[in-house]
Image (tube, helix red, strand yellow):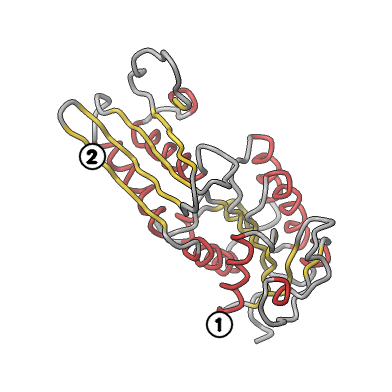
Amino acid sequence: MTDLPGIVITGASGRMGQMLATTVLASQRARLVGAVERAGHPWIGQDLGIATGGVANGVIVTDDPLTALAGAQAVIDFTAPAATVEFAALAAQARATHVIGTTGLEPAHLARIAAAARHAVIVRAGNMSLGVNLLVQLTRKVAAALDPDWDIEIVEAHHRMKVDAPSGTALMLGQAAAEGRGIDLDANREAGRDGITGARHPGAIGFSSVRGGDIVGEHDVIFAALGERVILRHVATDRAIFARGALRAALWGQTQKPGEYDMLDVLGL
């Protein structure tokens, strides 16, 4: 068992952190060797299993990611942009695969992640599920097949606690649509419509966000023309799909050269 890749989970107390820990612990292909939380968190110093209301598993929650990463082969990170760029630098020092599911990353964050990727494998994706990544491919193909008279709208829904909008997955889909149409997403993006907005801008890719309850994740890509619509849809009902995808990415990264990758690379799409 000790020859299996050792994996560290950051943000271990969060919903995704707990799901990731459960997934790694249940895996026959990896070991959970570390759990990281922010300084001052009440779980610091506790056994992760006890902290989550279960039985002890020997993994002590720490606020020292450098120590946690010592000897680890991968870190799975669904936290916040400021934390993620720090973890990227530490993972690069440790030459550990860094799987990033954090969303809301801005150009300055991405630049630091790109620098870290010169020294270690980084797999970054707005969504780790197989179904969503297939949807990305379909969106690109449909956008390429339809002429610009077809309007493109992306509607996403998530739980009430999500802090960024549009979701990382929605932006992935928007980027795929823009690539399929051969346009720049930033120059053709419309979001947050309110009031007297005027007619829809020709060629725009629109985004709408819904927040409520415990919605895990729902994404629709709507291609609308006069008299007809094509709708591509993905609905996630269990957060475990993201954890399984992240673990798959961490294992895949063990045989890759340093660089930035995404889930399309991991899935061979």
For the point 57% across and 46% down, which residue is it? Answer: 162
Q: Quadrant of the C terminus?
A: bottom left
Q: Quadrant of the N terminus?
A: bottom right
For the point 60% across and 41% down, which residue is it? Answer: 104
Which of the two labelled residues, at mark 2 and mark 1, occupies the earlier sequence position?
A: 1
In the image, 235 versus 122, the foreground residue is: 235
Q: Is residue 2 left or right of residue 251?
A: right
| Direction bottom: furthest residue | 1
Residue with the mark numbered 1:
28
Location of residue 220 in the rendering, given as x and y in whole percent from the top left corner: 35, 43
In the image, 163 versus 173, the foreground residue is: 163
Residue with the mark numbered 2:
230
- What's the residue type where badge 2 is placed? Val
Location of residue 92 in the rendering, given as x and y in whole percent from the top left corner: 73, 56
Location of residue 130 in the rendering, given as x and y in whole percent from the top left corner: 41, 60
Disc 2 to disc 1, how far (Cα)? 41 Å
Location of residue 4 in the rendering, given as x and y in whole percent from the top left corner: 63, 80
Res. 47 mark: none
For the point 68% across and 71% down, which residue is it? Answer: 52
Quadrant position of residue 22: bottom right
Q: Is residue 175 left or right of residue 74?
A: left
In the image, 220 versus 98, the foreground residue is: 220
**Eye-nearest disc, 2 or 1:** 2
